[in-house]
Image (cartoon, helix red, strand yellow):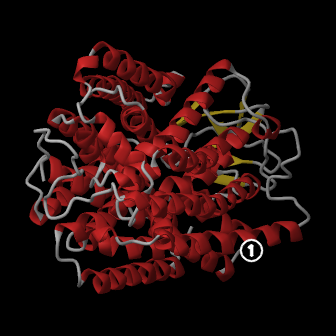
């Protein structure tokens, strides 16, 4: 691997364009409304591009292809879930949430249920979710940097990008970030689409055969020429057929024959030589052969894990704070619903490309199944298919798109999390917003460096599980069920959130110790979401006397058509929701 100056130039170009657009649009940002909700004047097309821009993160740009390379058919639930979550959002949440007139999820919950403790608790979960979501983004930055600049430690990438993101959002807030993210969505789409079309043309021109054979073969992928692989992290490998392996760091001159059904631990930095025609070993959780890769898993644990992934992906989207914060920037509920439909179209087109790149990666870069660095497949594939300058230029385009993915997702998340924490736990000043941006980004950078790397999509899936287990039940019930009480919402949120955070702790500890985990630790949503939902319903029924007196009025405001004029936005610290009675509930500004 050698230095790719084209990739560095592409990243620098995207960074310069981001800073320029942010600076130009930040000149009119003067008030709290500008920083948090862009004065609620963002139209549906731009907002759809901005939502797609911050939603398409490292897990989408790099992680989906890596999972397809490793897991095949089972990995398709991630892009399907990432997209289909917006279908549930447009049906159940988008328009009523916008009509609430709130700034954010905690603001909506207090306006609906009238409990400050519920608002503070939800803000704490927003902060936890933000950290879980940010860590894999920054780890993806480090992985991308190692792919284009050999010999550079991954933590440099996390540090540099955190500094860039903080500088980009510290003084500008939501108004500036909206245009930047809309621009970066189109950068990411074209940066992925154009190389995909080009590489598919190369693949078809080669007769449908890659460096490891064809995907239709039942056997595992194989090395068609003698190949030396340097393992970048501690992994456990296994093989489906007897395979000759020459461990170059050992004194033995003869190759060792690895046998099926045996795990072979390999240390970081160890070099393995595979003769031509050798089958490709894979990391312990990957599919061994193409036949299994092409078919969904049949093992019971794998099926339960798949159902849990589907639950997290489909329901977690409607609980992501940086996505929901975008709907508060629309002028009204109709615009919010129209925005969501457009997002569905944009995401449906985008996710076709990482799937194709993941399939091509299994043919041309099977050595990533040995190193365990499958998330690097998008950046390693072009040079394997197009040697020389042509491959490096394609990598440059993809690297620029990956950088846009890191920056846009992290910027949007930082703005929404900082806005909620500053509004609900501090004093709702621009200075507090900037302090929270600095603190959250610093903690995320430290976590990215200290915590072990895992598949990006899997780690982001835990953030979706937390969103689905905390905010999804209270949003659905708060919008559609009049009998919800703040006690039920609070206990349901605590049950679901505590369950997911406990699973996250066990998952991290297991990764540090190199141990495997059961499916409900790797993805707990199938257990935590029903537990949170049932707890919320049962406790609300048991505390029926605590249903707010004006619940019917608020429900009318959430569901009445926009043209009737029931919607009333908070302005300058005023009430979050128009009250049609004389209730004495207070709402913090």
Q: Quadrant of residue 60?
A: bottom right
Left or right for 77, reference 277: left
Quarter of the image with the N terminus is bottom right
For the residue labelled by badge 1, is the local secondary structure a helix, a strand or a loop?
helix
Residue found farthest to the top: 542
Q: Which of 269 and 201 is in front in this view?
A: 201
x, y (%) of residue 22? Answer: 32, 79
Q: Mark 1 points at which residue?
A: 198
- Residue 509: percent from left, percent from top: 36, 29
Task: Look at the picture and state if 14 lies above or below 150.
Answer: below
| Residue 242 position in % (x across, y down) | 78, 31
Residue 571 drawn above or below residue 2: above
Please state if 225 lies on the left or on the right of 544 as rendered.
Answer: right
Query: Measured along the vertical axis of the image, is residue 115 above or below residue 162?
Result: above
Q: Residue at x 51, y 21 (%)?
A: 518
**Residue occupying image coordinates x 61% and y 23%:** 304
Specify the quadrant of the image occupied by residue 140: bottom left
Using a 10 Å C-alpha cutoff, classify the residue at mark 1 as few (fewer than 14 neighbours), some (14 to 19) or many (20 or more).
Answer: few
Kindly tell me whether residue 201 is visible in this rendering: yes
**Residue lying farthest to the right in this orientation:** 207
Q: Nearer the viewer, residue 363 or 14?
A: 14
Tell me how many marks there are: 1
Q: Where is residue 27 in the image (x, y as percent from the top left)?
A: 23, 84
Q: In this view, does 390 lie above or below 489?
A: below
Q: Is residue 460 visible?
A: no
Residue at horizontal 63 percent and vertical 38 percent from the top: 252
Q: Which residue is drawn at 48% across and 21% down?
A: 527
């Amino acid at each position: 691997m050698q230095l790719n100056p084209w990739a560095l130039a592409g990243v620098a170009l995207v960074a310069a364009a981001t800073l320029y657009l942010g600076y130009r649009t930040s000149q009119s940002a003067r008030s709290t409304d500008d920083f948090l909700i862009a004065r609620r004047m963002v139209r549906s097309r731009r907002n759809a591009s901005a939502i797609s821009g911050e939603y398409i993160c490292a897990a989408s740009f790099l992680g989906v292809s890596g999972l397809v390379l490793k897991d095949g058919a089972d990995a398709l639930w991630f892009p399907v879930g990432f997209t289909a979550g917006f279908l549930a959002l447009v049906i159940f949440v988008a328009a009523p949430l916008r009509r609430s007139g709130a700034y954010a999820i905690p603001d909506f919950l207090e306006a609906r249920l009238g409990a400050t403790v519920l608002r503070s608790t939800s803000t704490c979960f927003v902060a936890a979710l933000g950290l879980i979501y940010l860590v894999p983004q920054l780890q993806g930055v480090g992985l991308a940097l190692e792919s284009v600049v050999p010999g550079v430690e991954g933590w440099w990438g996390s540090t540099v990008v955190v500094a860039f993101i903080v500088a980009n959002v510290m003084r500008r807030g939501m108004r500036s970030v909206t245009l930047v993210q809309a621009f970066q969505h189109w950068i990411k789409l074209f940066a992925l689409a154009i190389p995909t079309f080009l590489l598919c043309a190369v693949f078809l021109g080669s007769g449908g055969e890659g460096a490891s054979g064809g995907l239709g073969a039942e056997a595992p992928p194989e090395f068609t020429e003698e190949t030396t692989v340097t393992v970048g992290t501690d992994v456990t490998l296994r093989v489906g057929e007897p395979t000759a392996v020459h461990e170059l760091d050992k004194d033995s001159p003869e190759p060792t024959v690895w046998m099926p059904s045996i795990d072979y631990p390999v240390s970081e930095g160890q070099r393995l030589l595979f003769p031509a025609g050798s089958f490709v070993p894979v990391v312990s959780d990957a599919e061994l052969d193409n036949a299994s890769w092409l078919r969904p898993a049949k093992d019971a644990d794998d099926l339960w894990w798949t159902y849990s992934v589907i639950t997290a992906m489909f329901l977690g989207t409607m609980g992501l704070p940086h996505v929901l914060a975008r709907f508060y920037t629309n002028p009204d509920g109709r615009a919010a619903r129209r925005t969501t439909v457009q997002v569905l179209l944009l995401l449906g087109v985008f996710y076709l490309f990482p799937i194709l790149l993941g399939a091509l990666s299994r043919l041309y870069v099977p050595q990533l199944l040995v190193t365990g660095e499958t998330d690097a497949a998008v950046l390693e594939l072009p040079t394997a298919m197009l040697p020389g300058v042509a491959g490096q230029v394609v990598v440059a385009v993809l690297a620029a798109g990956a950088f846009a993915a890191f920056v846009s997702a992290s910027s949007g998340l930082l703005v929404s999390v900082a806005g909620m924490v500053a509004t609900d736990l501090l004093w709702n000043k621009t200075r507090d917003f900037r302090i929270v941006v600095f603190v959250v980004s610093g903690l995320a950078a430290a976590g990215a460096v200290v915590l072990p790397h895992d598949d990006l999509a899997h780690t982001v899936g835990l953030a979706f599980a937390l969103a689905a287990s905390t905010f999804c039940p209270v949003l659905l019930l708060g919008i559609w069920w009049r009998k919800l009480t703040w006690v039920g919402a609070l206990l349901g949120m605590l049950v679901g959130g505590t369950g997911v955070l406990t699973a996250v702790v066990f998952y991290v500890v297991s990764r540090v110790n190199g141990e495997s985990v059961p499916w409900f630790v790797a993805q707990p949503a199938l257990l935590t979401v029903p537990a949170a939902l049932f707890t919320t319903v049962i406790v609300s029924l048991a505390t029926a006397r605590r249903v707010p007196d004006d619940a019917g009025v608020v429900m009318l405001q959430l569901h009445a058509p926009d043209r009737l004029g029931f919607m009333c936005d908070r302005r300058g610290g005023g009430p979050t929701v128009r009250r049609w009675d004389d209730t004495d509930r207070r709402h913090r500004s």
